[in-house]
C-alpha cells in the first residue's frame, strides 16, 4: 500500500482516555514525516529525471559513436579504394612508359639499320665513283701519252 504525504497529514488516531497520545505531538510528528516524505518524493522525481536524461544522452552518444564508426569505416574503404586505384594507375603508367620506350628503342634500332645501309651504299657508290674516275683518268692519261708520241 502506497502512502502519500497527504495520507500522512490526514491520518487520525483514536485517543485513549487515560494516558493517551498527545494529539499535538502526533500532528507535529505527522507533519514532519509528511514534509520529509515530500522532500524524498521530489528528490526521487529529480533523480529519475536526471537518470532519464543521462540514459537519453548515453543513447545519443552510442548513436553518435555508431555513426562515427560507420563514417570511419566508409572513409577507410574509400582510402583503400583510392590506394588500389592509384596503384592500378601507376602500373598502367609504367606499362605505357615501358611500351613507349620499347617503341622508341625499336625505332632507333631501325633508324640505325637504315643509316648503316645508307653508309654501305655511299661507300659502294664512292668505290664505284673512284673506280670510274680512276678509269677516266687512266683513259685521259693514255690519250695524252698517245698524243705525245
Image: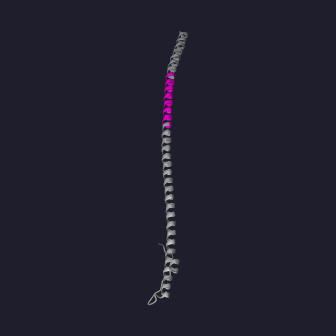
Is 22 part of what is drawn in magenta?
no
In this rendering, is residue 15 above or below 44?
below
Q: Nearer the viewer, residue 91 or 38?
A: 38
User: Residue at 50% across / 39% down in the picture?
Assistant: 92
x and y, in percent, of residue 7 in the image: 51, 77
Outermost residue toward the left in this view: 19
Image coords of residue 21 (percent x, y): 46, 87
> Residue at horizontal 50%, vertical 36%?
96
Residues 149 and 25: in front is 25
Magenta region's main secondary structure?
A: helix
Specify whether residue 104 is painted magenta: yes
Percent x, y of residue 130: 51, 19
- In the depicted view, which residue is nearer to us: 64 or 29? 29
Report x, y in % for residue 79: 49, 49
Q: Which residues are magenta?
A: 96-121
Q: Is residue 1 above or below residue 148?
A: below
Amino acid at each position: 500500500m502506497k502512502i502519500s504525504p497527504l495520507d500522512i497529514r490526514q491520518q487520525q488516531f483514536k485517543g485513549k482516555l487515560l494516558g493517551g497520545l498527545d494529539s499535538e505531538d502526533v500532528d507535529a510528528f505527522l507533519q514532519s514525516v509528511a514534509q520529509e516524505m515530500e522532500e524524498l518524493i521530489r528528490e526521487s522525481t529529480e533523480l529519475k529525471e536526471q537518470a532519464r536524461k543521462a540514459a537519453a544522452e548515453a543513447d545519443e552518444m552510442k548513436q553518435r559513436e555508431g555513426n562515427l564508426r560507420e563514417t570511419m569505416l566508409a572513409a577507410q574503404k574509400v582510402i583503400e579504394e583510392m590506394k588500389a586505384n592509384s596503384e592500378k594507375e601507376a602500373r598502367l603508367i609504367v606499362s605505357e612508359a615501358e611500351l613507349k620506350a620499347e617503341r622508341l628503342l625499336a625505332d632507333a634500332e631501325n633508324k640505325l639499320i637504315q643509316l648503316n645501309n645508307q653508309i654501305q651504299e655511299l661507300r659502294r657508290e664512292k668505290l664505284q665513283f673512284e673506280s670510274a674516275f680512276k678509269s677516266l683518268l687512266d683513259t685521259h692519261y693514255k690519250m695524252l701519252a698517245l698524243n705525245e708520241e
